[in-house]
Amino acid sequence: MALTLAPETTRFQREIKLGRVLVVEDEELIRETIALALLEEGYEVVTAEDGRKGLNLVCKSIESGYPDTSLFDLIILDLMLPYVNGLDLCRLVRHEGNSVPILMLSAKGSETDRVVGLEVGADDYLTKPFGMRELVARCRALLRRHRHTQIPTQEATLRFHDIALYPQECRVTVRSEDINLSPKEFRILELFMSHPRRVWSREQLIERIWGPDFMGDSKTVDVHIRWLREKLEIDPSHPEYLLTVRGFGYRFG
Ligand code: CA
């Protein structure tokens, strides 16, 4: 199990979109130093100490949704790792069509490593030893660049019949009236509206909205769906938007 450093304060910061970073690094001191530096900057951090654990976390992330909506906003990947090396891990992520920014770390400083790293799909490359300020600056630049390229799809208004969701304004209108949603309700609705008719299991919703460290049970999802129905549906007991798919979960539309 990966060590997860996600106290409530950083969880809160994720809500304001600083991002969740996966750090795959086998040298404990480097791993912990990177994690702390990023936590201090306000990122949420998940760590893995070898390639296999990193791979599991990345696969979980891929299974949980479409490639453009990964669980991680950025991956910091060491090149030399036990079990599965950084190059193979990077190749796999890209093979799955996942465009999450990847910053590769290496103890070697040769030009070949750098070229190979970038060839398999890493976005940036940093040679050890490096300063934390440099690392944080690179992370920030990668996230900014990535978000910039994502803006057209991420920030477009989502519409379905008489419901409109404005991601940039965190605002939702139903039948032309503004409604009040909690941040969780907003994110659930945004997820549903971004993937119309896709069925989401309770576990997938927990993973995506509450994060992998959520300790509560899946009833929480049902409660939030009920609240959302009360705000969206004309008749919440006969929903037309948020539908239950028996034995699977929920879908929108
Ligand atoms: Ca290493």
Image (spheres, rainbow, N blue to C red):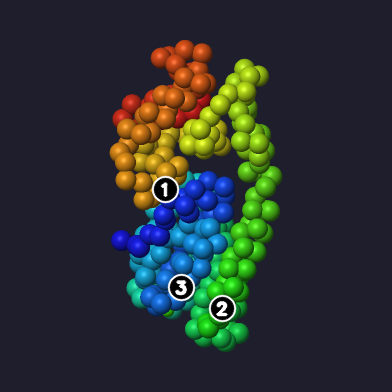
**What distance separates the C-alpha of mark 2 from that of mark 3?**
10 Å
**Residue type indicated by callout 3:** Thr
Residue in the image at 52% along x and 21% along y: 232
Q: Nearer the viewer, residue 239 or 42?
A: 42
Q: Position of residue 183 (x, y in %)?
A: 52, 37
Q: Position of residue 220 (x, y in %)?
A: 35, 34
The numbered disc on residue 190 is none
Provide the residue designation for mark 1. Answer: 211
The numbered disc on residue 131 is 2
Q: Which type of secondary structure does the marked residue at label 2 adopt?
A: loop
Density class for disc 2 (Cα within 10 Å; few <14, some 14-19, many ≥20) is few
Q: Which type of secondary structure does the marked residue at label 1 adopt?
A: loop
Q: Nearer the viewer, residue 30 or 111?
A: 30
Residue in the image at 49% along x and 48% along y: 12
The numbered disc on residue 33 is 3
**Residue type indicated by callout 2:** Gly
Instruction: Work out whether 105 lies above or below 228.
Output: below
| Label 1 vs 2, first from the N-terminus | 2
Q: Is residue 119 visible?
A: no
| Label 3 vs 1, first from the N-terminus | 3
CB of mark 1 near ligand 1 (< 8 Å):
no
Tell me whether the residue at label 1 lies in contact with that at label 2, contact meaning CB atoms closer than 8 angstroms: no
Instruction: Work out whether 168 lies above or below 26.
Output: above
Pick the quarter of the image with the N terminus: bottom left
**What distance separates the C-alpha of mark 3 from that of mark 1?**
23 Å
In the image: residue 157, left or right of residue 191: right
Residue in the image at 55% along x and 62% along y: 41
Residue in the image at 51% along x and 25% along y: 253
| Label 2 vs 3, first from the N-terminus | 3
